[in-house]
Image: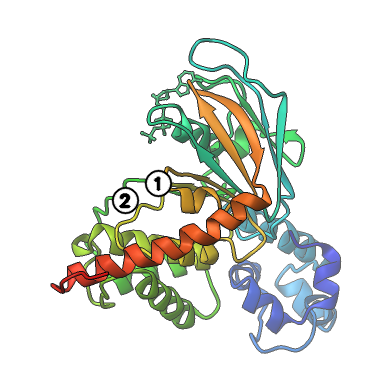
Amino acid sequence: MISRNYLEVKTIEHLLEKYPFISEFLTDNLVDIDEKDQRTLPELLNSLDEETLEEKAINPEEILEGVVSFANQMIEFLGIGENTINELTIVAGYNKHGEKESFEKLTIKKGEIISIVGPTGSGKSRLLADIEWGAQGDTPTKRSILINGEGIDKTSRFSSGNKLVAQLSQNMNFVMDLTVFEFLELHAKSRMVEDEEDVINKIFDKANELAGEKFKKETPITSLSGGQSRALMIADTAILSTSPIVLIDEIENAGIDRKKALDLLVGEEKIVLMATHDPLLALMGDKRIVIKNGGIHDVMDIISEERDILHELTKLDNVIQGMREKLRHGHKLEL
Ligand SMILES: Nc1ncnc2c1ncn2[C@@H]1O[C@H](COP(=O)(O)OP(=O)(O)OP(=O)(O)O)[C@@H](O)[C@H]1O
């Protein structure tokens, strides 16, 4: 959000660089601007002579107020506001048998990674869907989700600009007829990033680091393999998405470096929830939620013994990954 005071202290160059859409608003209101102007907007408006103000029917105070409200609407619509979410709370609902879940409230703080474990069909994806949807007692589980201790109002729940949550789901089917570059360009443009080229290159390089088999910027996204498209979406979400909450429904083994992927996704201060059957990922969290019969059955801290086990598992996993690579390239395995 920007304030009236923000306009008093930032130069026009800074303002337009950060929020390019303001330039359109000013032009529509007949205020001539130079994108490199080192003055503030109030300074520019104050420098206009009476004749110009009258001729163009410019009222400086109205323009400034207009800029603030227009910019804030655009910021909200585009989901580019500052990350102001500090915690997410899950309020208990009911399991598949209609029994109350065995906790009252579970609060997850910014920077925490929570893994979600449980048998197939137990309700892990349902929990992620409740969060994504911002459930307010109106899903099969009857859970409610609070953000910073408060319920989510209907308008922000349904607004297209609601970018609270970024979700990486199990099925990633691209139907668009675009190359990798065009896809990233489209996404970067819609997010109005300042250094588009840089951001596209960064996502592309990271995705290729995660994917076993390299791909090119000219590759059509429809011909990426499962692992490659997953790698592309992970890098894209990690670098481009400003969403403070990241939901991951299984980073499967398909040739992706899972640890690197997770490190990339949680690099910033985000809230991360990840459903997984993989012990390596399950132990990388700060806590794990155990789901049984559609309900949250337990919330466990990851204890230090388990961290030691994680260390051992990582070594084992490296051995398995190494063997996988050898097999893929037609080599014989030996101990
Ligand atoms: N508390 C609940 N009440 C009613 N239905 C529920 C509840 N929890 C989950 N379900 C339903 O049970 C089904 C299976 O749940 P879900 O797909 O979330 O399982 P999962 O743990 O993600 O499975 P997998 O590991 O196979 O991906 C879904 O149709 C879901 O909507």
Pick the front one: 181 or 293: 293
Residues at discs 1 and 2 in contact (Cβ within 8 Å)? yes
- Mark number, residue 169: 1
Count of marks placed on residues? 2
Location of residue 34 with respect to 233 vertically, above or below: below
Location of residue 108 with respect to 61 vertically, above or below: above
Q: Position of residue 75 (x, y in %)?
A: 64, 58
Q: CA distance from mark 1 to mark 2?
A: 7 Å
Residue at 53% across, 72% down: 193
Q: Position of residue 58 (x, y in %)?
A: 75, 69
Q: Determine which residue is flagged by label 2.
A: 172
Pick the front one: 171 or 219: 171
- The residue type indicated by label 2 comes to Met
Does any portion of residue 179 appear in the rendered image? no
Q: Quadrant of ligand 1?
A: top left
Element type at marker 1? loop
Query: Is label 1 within 8 A of ligand 1 (CB to nearest ligand atom)?
Result: no
